Amino acid sequence: MAELSTIARPYAEALFKASGAAAPSGPGLDLDGTAAWLDELAAIAANAQLQQFAGNPGVTAVQTFDVISGVVKATLPEAAKNFLRTVIDNGRLSVLPEIARQFRVLKNAQGGSSDATVYSAFALDGAALSDLTATLEKRFGKKLNLRVELQPELIGGVRVVVGDEVLDTSVKARLEQMKVALIS
């Protein structure tokens, strides 16, 4: 079976091209709006119960579409409905989270930014987060879209993941380094 990223790539690229067509000369979608509804659809599609429902041979594509569109918080634009129908009709609902991830990568590449996840032992207030953002943007040399997740097991400090790069300044990581140094 083909890898999810291989299956998702043509969908993400086609949607990106359609979204990028929002030039002054012609109609198109806007990248931020598309990313918003695509992320919501991806979160819904990642649900295991929905996957099981959609995989049932007795369930039609229309029923699957109706269930998903009934769960969506806001009204979907016509382009989103058409995209969702295409994904469902082609049996690619399970690939939707990967499509959304690849779409974000394309969108970020065009805007010169990257997604970053900050794992912190404690909640970060506004000032600390803006200082951290400035420091990380200087360190990585690009604009970052930060998302913060709490991980109390880090004890203190932060662990930052930007693409395939990891910057770990957590107390847990330092204790592990000390352990390795003491054992060797």
Image (cartoon, rainbow, N blue to C red):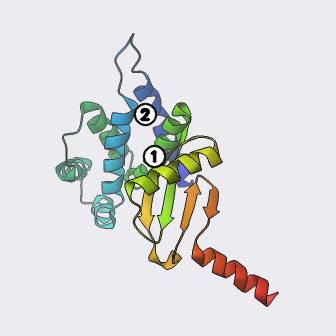
Residue at 47%, 39% in the rendered image: 12
Residue at 24%, 60% in the rendered image: 58
**Residue 5 at x, y = what percent?**
55, 50
- Judged left or right of residue 130, residue 173 is right
In the rendered view, would you say 184 is above or below 34? below
Q: Secondary structure at mark 2?
A: helix
Q: Are circles 2 and 1 on residues that touch, CB within 8 Å?
A: yes
Residue at 32%, 49% in the rendered image: 41
Residue type indicated by callout 1: Ile
Residue 99 image label: 1
**Residue 120 at x, y = what percent?**
48, 67
* Residue 98 in view: no
- Marked residue nearer the N-terminal end (2 or 1): 2
Residue type indicated by callout 2: Leu
Using the image as rendered, state which of residue 179 and residue 44 is in the foreground.
Answer: 179
Mark 1 nearby-residue class (10 Å; few <14, some 14–19, many ≥20): many
For this orientation, the residue located farthest to the right is 184
Q: Where is residue 22, by image quadrant?
A: top left
Q: Secondary structure at mark 1?
A: helix
For this orientation, the residue located farthest to the top is 25
Q: Quadrant of the N terminus?
A: bottom right
- Judged left or right of residue 30, residue 159 is right
Using the image as rendered, state which of residue 153 and residue 41 is in the foreground.
Answer: 153
Residue 15 image label: 2
Residue at 43%, 46% in the rendered image: 100
C-alpha separation, residue under disc 2 versus residue under disc 1:
9 Å
**Residue 146 at x, y = what percent?**
47, 51
In the rendered view, would you say 93 is above or below 18? below
**Residue 63 at x, y = what percent?**
20, 51
For this orientation, the residue located farthest to the front is 127
